[in-house]
Amino acid sequence: MTKKIIISLAVIIAVALGVLYGKGLLSVHQGLEPPASLSALALEKSPKTAPNVQFTDAKGSRYALDAFRGRYVLLNLWATWCGPCVNELPSLARLSRFAPGVRVVAIDTADLATVDAAGFLKEHNAGNLAAYRDSEKVMMKTFGAFALPMTVLIDPQGKIVAKAAGPADWGSPDAVAYFKRITGT
């Protein structure tokens, strides 16, 4: 008799959770709510797979976004001419340094091939970030970036779980603690 009651309760709970999830009242990514210092970071209601776009590093080697799958990725689209982008570079570098469970992939979207992205990052206290470039603006088109900076949080399964339009203090103590919590590091 007790076994039937336990099974019945388990079925009722499973159905209730299914209904809540189906109505959008329960998210697969609950617990990912960012702290107030990351108010620009909005969780996606229905996470979708990130497109496998390509970009290059400072030496011209090509990379696919899928190469970073298996860990959290904070994809940041920026440009050398964008003041708010340049201002947030040091905070992205701090996050990269203090939250090793998240891979910060900062991509320069400027079409200025003459700019040394690695040197630019170093000059702006972000020399620990790898210098990536998307001079063809594929990333901006694919992710619908109408303004910079734009940042996308991708989970280890390759799903876009959150986006931020505009700058944020990624390296604040609250932000670092948040990324350590969601990555388990």
Image: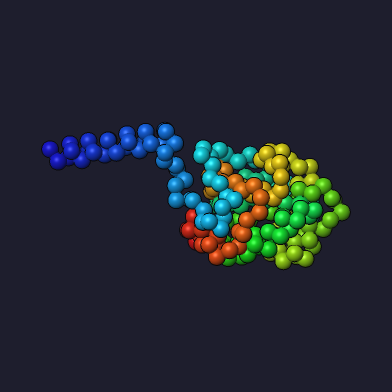
Tell me: 14 left or right of 177: left
Picture quadrant of residue 90: bottom right
For the point 65% across and 59% down, which residue is it? Answer: 92
User: x, y (%) of residue 91?
Assistant: 65, 62
Tell me: 89 left or right of 39: right
Q: Residue furthest left?
A: 1
Q: Residue furthest right?
A: 114
Quadrant location, the N terminus: top left
From the viewer's side, name the closer residue of 76 and 100: 76
From the viewer's side, name the closer residue of 127 and 32: 32
From the viewer's side, name the closer residue of 132 and 40: 40
Tell me: 54 left or right of 115: left
Asked whether residue 66 appears in the rendered view, the answer is yes
For the point 72% across and 66% down, which residue is it? Answer: 125
User: x, y (%) of residue 39?
Assistant: 56, 52
Asked whether residue 183 appears in the rendered view, the answer is no
User: x, y (%) of residue 48?
Assistant: 56, 38
For the point 76% across and 48% down, which residue is it? Answer: 109
For the point 71% across and 45% down, which residue is it? Answer: 147
Q: How many marks?
A: 0
User: x, y (%) of residue 67?
Assistant: 63, 48
Asked if residue 10 is positioned above or below residue 177 in the image, the reply reads: above
